[in-house]
Image: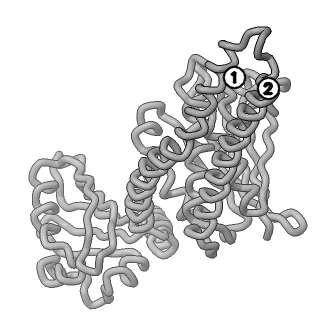
Amino acid sequence: MQSKSEQITELTIRNEELENYFSNTIIPQLFVDGDLILRKFTPPAMRQFSLREEHIGKSIEEVRENFRFHSIIDDIRGVIYDGNILEREIQTVDKRWYQMNILPYRIKRENRTNGVIITFVDITARIRDLRELEKLVAENELLIDTIVHDIRTPLTALGLTIQMLKKLTSKNMEKFTELLGYLDNSQQKIKSIANELVQSRWADIENRSPVETIDLENIFEDVKLTLAQQISETKSSIFSRLEVSEVSMSRRSLRSIIYNLVGNAIKYRSPDRRPEIAITSRRENNFILIGISDNGMGIAKDDQDRIFRKFERINHNVEGNGVGLYLVKESLQTNGGDITVTSEAGKGSEFTIRLKA
């Protein structure tokens, strides 16, 4: 049995550990007791919601305007009452979006809820990306209509020429060369339209995706939020070890790349073990390397070059269309980077992204 001094020492150590956590976490968090008194908050909450030390010990009612979210009090009361976790996407009056999680604080020995822990994850960029995606879908629908319109004329000419070729007889073979010229013209026209469309789309993507300084940890957290259901269902473990925390690239492009690679690591998991995914970053000469490794199904050596080809699929037992890794490679090369893979069938894979520092 511990002496009183030993108990005090242990309590002091645990308190210091808790204070270190509060001081270093990057997520705004609030601790509100069962009487709706604000007991503690992390430094990011001070910055994000203009909280000050003198707010500690006050009723959350007195500082509710700091959060600019009208139903926060009712949500806190609801969690304290029923003991269930509340997850909600909220928008504050300053037009920013947050993933708000309210977790009940349980006193086990008394079997009751005596407050809540509230976390706020800024998802403004993700919501903006989703809206941009909706816009892109609408634009792509228009693009499809344009393709159909532009390609219909040469296709019609191609079909007519083929019909005429079928009707040729030995008596009028002098027209063969002329008809062959028509076929070639139609084929060149279709090829020209396809090339113009591809070039215009890549130029459009480059123009609308400005390069910026990105916090890798924020990108990873955003991707994990987006894949939360898949991570939960597969009991995936995802952790990061970052020697470099910032890179320069289009946020939308990098987020899409990381999302694709982490999503694939979950999708192509081994049936024999829980998915474990490690995300690393380091500097090597004039490049920043981002690694995403897993303990999944792995890729046979002969297939490792094929996976980056368009519409190429090596595993038909998993849903997909064979364009994800192709688009990842194209996007990286457009931004002056590249991607490679090392893998062993049955043991897992590691994809390495190279970006200019």
Quarter occupied by residue 260: top right
Q: Which colour scheme is used?
A: one colour
- If the image is split into quadrants, where does the C terminus sit? bottom right
User: Residue at coordinates 18% horizontally, 59% vertically from top-left?
Assistant: 114
Amino acid bearing label 2: Asp
On the image, numbered disc 1 is attached to which residue? 314
Determine which of the numbered discs, if any, sits on residue 139 in the image.
none
Foreground of the two, 208 or 15: 208
Taking the view exactly as shown, the residue that stands out farthest to the front is 171
81 versus 58 height, above or below: above
Tell whether label 2 touches label 1 (CB within 8 Å): yes
Residue 12 visible? The answer is: no
Determine which of the numbered discs, if any, sits on residue 303 in the image.
2
Taking the view exactly as shown, the residue that stands out farthest to the right is 285
Foreground of the two, 237 or 304: 304
Counting from the top left corner in percent of width and height, residue 322 is at 62, 32
User: Residue at coordinates 30% horizontally, 70% vertically from top-left?
Assistant: 30
